[in-house]
Image (cartoon, rainbow, N blue to C red):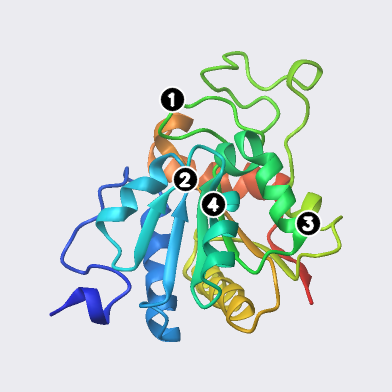
Amino acid sequence: MNYRRTKGIREDMASGFCPGCMHGTVFKLIGEVVEELGIRDRAANVQGVGCCGLAMEYVTYDVTTSPHGRACAVATGVKRANPETIVFTYQGDGDLASIGLAESMSAANRGENITVIFINNGIYGMTGGQMAPTTLIGMKATTAPQGRIVEEHGYPMHMCEILNTLTAPVYLERTSCNTPANTRKTKAAIKKAFRNQIEGRGFSLVEIVTTCPTNWGMNPLKALEFLEEEMFREFPLGVIRDR
């Protein structure tokens, strides 16, 4: 089978992500959406720095990696230079909400006609388990060995709610892949975000709250329990804006 012409994902390769990580699931959903919408030859993914970069081996659409945090800026340039291309970023919380906060906010504020897939696992992944803007209060990280302390580090940032204060974004939703039902909702959200871009409606962001068993220091089952009991309490799932 010629994967370059028929599929959004390569079905002949096994995932190289850590056990319990949801990156593989999300990329499979993106690949299915790209295939179902018939946009594989028009799709271009701008990846942030981190574990998301591993997916280059598993997808069949065009991919480029931006400097750390600059995915929305690069995606803006790609989209403006090639308006017919379906451009989407794939970024972690450190990339989008910390190093790239200015680029993310500015692209949303301008209403750029791009799609952002935002992976929120509450920590920096590949770069060493540092505290991210989304790290929970009391949650330990390599740069916060005593846990996140409000007086020292501030509170977790809620990107969907922050972007909801802007006028331009058309679609903001927070989802997860912890259950089959939520996985289906995540796929539907991704498809809606892509359709918004196809229809020229403007900036869409899907935030997917996921696990990181390796940097959380948990096995996959405990990480899933932490996700459902603690992460969802801080980051409740649902549609934030749909215009």
- Determine the residue located farthest toward the front in the rendered image: 81
Which quarter of the rendering shows the N terminus?
Answer: bottom left
Pointer 3 or 2: first along the chain = 2
Near mark 1 (Cα within 10 A), the count class, few <14, some 14-19 or many ≥20, is few
Q: Are marks 1 and 4 in contact (CB under 8 Å)?
A: no
Relative to 227, 243 lies left or right: right
Q: Which residue is mark 4?
A: 74
Q: Quadrant of the C terminus?
A: bottom right
Q: Label 4 to label 3, Cα distance in Å?
A: 16 Å
User: Residue 179 or 116: which is nearer the viewer?
Assistant: 116
Q: Which amino acid is tagged 2?
A: Ser
Mark 1 or mark 4, earlier in chain: 4
In front of the other: label 4 or label 3? 4
- Taking the spot 63% from the left edge, 20% from the top edge, the residue there is 147
Secondary structure under tag 2 reads: loop
Q: CA distance from mark 3 to mark 2?
A: 20 Å
* Residue sitting at the far left: 1
Q: Amino acid at mark 4?
A: Val
User: Cα distance, mark 2 to mark 4?
Assistant: 6 Å
Q: Secondary structure at mark 1?
A: loop
From the viewer's perspective, tell me whether residue 11 is left or right of residue 168: left
Q: Which residue is mark 2?
A: 66
Between discs 1 and 2, the one toward the N terminus: 2
Counting residues from the start of the chain, the first of labels 2 and 4 encountered is 2
Q: Categorize mark 4 by other alpha carbons within 10 Å: few (<14), some (14-19), many (20+).
A: some
- Return the disc, 1 or 3, that comes first in the chain's sequence: 3
**Amino acid type of the residue tagged 1 in the rendering:** Gly
Query: Which residue bears the numbered disc 1?
Result: 128
Kindly indicate the quadrant of the structure image that contains residue 188: bottom right
